[in-house]
Amino acid sequence: MIWEQLLSLKRYGDTNKRLRKEQDETRLGFEVDYDRIIFSSEFRSLQDKTQVIPLSKTDFVHTRLTHSLEVSVVGRSLGRQVGQKLLKKHPHLQSIHGYQANDFGAIVATAALAHDIGNPPFGHSGEKSIGEFFKSGIGKQYQSQLTDKEYQDLCDFEGNANGFKILTQSRAGREGGLRLSYATLGAFTKYPKESLPKKPTNHIVDKKYGFFQSEKEAFQDVANELGLSKRSNKALSYDRHPLAYLVEAADDICYTIIDFEDGINLGLIQEEYALEFLSKVIRDNIIPENYYALSNKEDRVGYLRALAIGALINDAVNIFMTHEEAILNGTFDCALLDKSKFEAQINDIIKISIENIYQSEEVVDKEIAGYQIINKLLSVYTAAVNHSFNGTASNYDKLILKRLPETINFKSDTLYERLLAVCHYVSLLSDSKAIQNFKKIEGVTF
């Protein structure tokens, strides 16, 4: 893979090349990508989607929206620092093609901004509950009518693949979805493979999958434009866009440090743990008198968090540049932070977060509720959509169909696309909207 191709400004429907040196510096293509995501309804719904603490009533706990904005900020710093170093190492990118360090920052920031845009309500349990519906629930009845890959898409419903669908799927008047640059779409796709075979290797790109069968051709188009290397001739699988490693690192840094901070602010983790574990990451940067001058817990933990994020950004940049050649040829097989000099400290922090936050009573209780809500919605919507297609819709089915949005095509001739459309619709619901729909179906509210 080569950087000149990986930094493509092409958008869906373009017939001519977009050259970096011809770009309007006041309205750069990669920055337009950022704007389009910010103003999308799918991004806006993240303000009411679970990050860690579902449906939390406290004002300092992160939602998917605030998490995505913070990951984007970290991603921008990672991209800019890497961009500066890459332009020194490959000066022709700037002298001949016109790329700037901020271009790398803009691509990573945008892909990071969108990294959770496809996640269903109720956190990762939302993905699992959709999968369970088809794997062992009512949806299992459809298995014999689907291809293995189509069925796997549903059984392992993946927020990353759903995100790619959101960013690229066409509808009347909106061909090519948000029409983002292919560089941004490449950086967004952490797992550039289809759902089968499942985890064929231990390489990081095979951990999950990045596009549904419905977007298979769209991703092939993106991969061909970017020059992503094929990993397999038997299945559709590619090497990662190098900047996807930075998007992943930005997410890893934020959920490691900021989830930990949320746990402390909620009282789920003792404040003493913050100084004990974070001080090992920031020992070269902390100024003790500044820390002890802060009078409240939130400010003290916030000070440690800021220094820790800065230290991990610098470490991730160094790891990326050290392994740039391996990243470009597809042999770098793990996340950047897996090579971090702070790996032990990161693992300790994650372990504490798992024990005290992710497995806390509040989180578990809301995840249980999320399973029931999503299962009910899928059951009712899939029945109504398929009964309508088969000409057997009841009056109840017809009422349900009136509540489904016109922006999603539920009338496809293929069963797979109808089922995926229902899953896609449910995934777009905010936590509160999913609960509201559930209550209406159950006849709890009018």
Image (tube, rainbow, N blue to C red):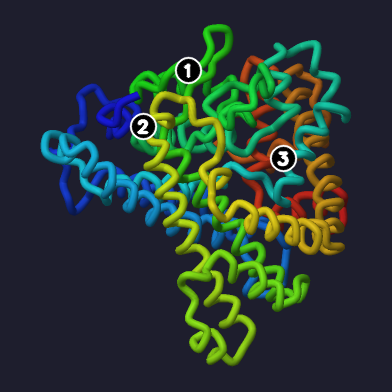
Residue drawn at x 71%, y 46% is: 124
Residue lying at 58% horizontally and 32% vertically, measured from the top left: 204
- The type of residue carrying mark 1 is Glu
Q: Secondary structure at mark 2?
A: helix
Q: For residue 211, what is the image quadrant?
A: top right
Q: Is residue 295 left or right of residue 273?
A: left
Graded by Cα atoms within 10 Å as few (under 14), some (14 to 19) or many (20 or more), the crowding at tag 3 reads many
**Which residue, given by chain and number where applicable, does mark 1 sit on?**
217
* Residue topped by disc 3: 127
SS for callout 1: helix
- Residue 395, above or below 194: below
User: Horizontal placement of 236 versus 25: left or right?
Assistant: right
Q: Quadrant of the C terminus?
A: bottom right
Task: Report which quarter residue 297 is drawn in.
Answer: bottom right
Q: In 3D space, how far apart are the residues under numbered discs 3 and 1 (Cα atoms)?
A: 24 Å
Residue 264 at x, y percent in the picture: 70, 73
Residue under label 2, please give it.
Answer: 182
Q: Secondary structure at mark 3?
A: helix
Please name the amino acid that badge 3 sits on: Glu
Amino acid carrying mark 2 in the image: Tyr
Q: Residue at x 73, y 60 (%)?
A: 353
Q: Position of residue 278 (x, y in %)?
A: 60, 68
Residue furthest to the top in view is 234
Answer whether labels 1 and 2 touch (C-beta < 8 Å). no
Looking at marks 3 and 1 on the same chain, the residue that comes earlier in the sequence is marked by: 3
Q: Is residue 213 visible?
A: yes
Pick the front one: 411 or 71? 71
* Residue sitting at x 72%, y 30%: 156
